[in-house]
Image: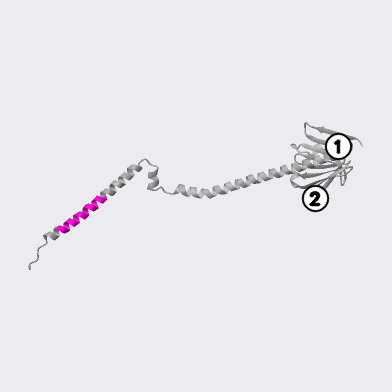
Amino acid sequence: MKQNTTNSPKANVLTRTNFFSKREMSELPLLLMPDERVLAVLSGFYTAGTAILCVTSHRLLLVDKKMVRLSFEDIRFESIREVNFSHQAIMASVKFIYAGREMQFRSWYKSELRMLAQLVQQKMFDVRDKSHQKNTTLENQITQAEETNQLEPEIRAESTKKPTAIDYYANNEAIDKYLSERIARWRKATRFVDTLTMSTKAGKQILKFEAPVAKR
């Protein structure tokens, strides 16, 4: 069996394929989306025979190309629940559990398969972190909107309230004049009441003094 080992540091791609994967490798570019990047590709086996396992920036792909048949499995990182790696004497295997299903892939390239499994786990964590951040941001926006809706009636009521004399004069330079006028009117009224009281008492005394003396 002839093996071909290729490692491209520039593209940061982990690639370990063999002669039996030529059909799958030629088919792989046709399955990628325009903005999708390949991060790792390994040759190996699954339940239906030989295939390649590919990790991209968007998903996990299992590609099996035969003479007259093409089959591939598209697994999104957010749907993967478990990644189980096991190491045997000759081969290594990795099992992916996702959406109530499972897929097992075996390969001779044991160390590379371990790195591929770790890469898939890292992509799973990245997707979940982004989802958590998005949910947190959405919750904060909802909270801010609720607080704004609660404050709006209070602000609207404050803006429609009619200003009183105290409100007017508290922010006006005529406050001193207003208070002086009120004090002057109060003093004038007080003096008038005092004068009226004294006049009443004096009138009573005069009437009493001029009253005729009764004859005995």
Q: Name the residue under label 2.
A: 101
Q: Can residue 124 be seen in this view?
A: yes
SS of the residue under disc 1: strand
- Percent coordinates x, y for residue 39 in the rendering: 78, 37
Residue range corresponding to the magenta coloring? 189-205
Along the horizontal axis of the image, is 79 left or right of 184? right
Q: Is residue 54 left or right of residue 176?
A: right
Q: Where is residue 96 in the image (x, y as percent from the top left)?
A: 80, 47
| Rendering quarter of residue 213 | bottom left
For disc 2, the neighbor class at 10 Å (few under 14, some 14 to 19, many from 20) is: few
Q: Residue at x 47, y 49 (%)?
A: 157
Q: Which of marks 2 and 1 is nearer the N terminus?
A: 1
Q: Left of 138 or right of it: where is 113?
A: right
Q: In which quarter of the image is residue 117?
A: top right
Residue receiving disc 1: 17
Residue in the picture at 12% in, 59% down: 209
Distance (Cα) linking label 2 and label 1: 26 Å
Residue 13, given in percent of the width and then of the height, sits at: 79, 35
Residue 69 can be seen, yes or no: no
Residue drawn 72% across the image and 43% down it: 127
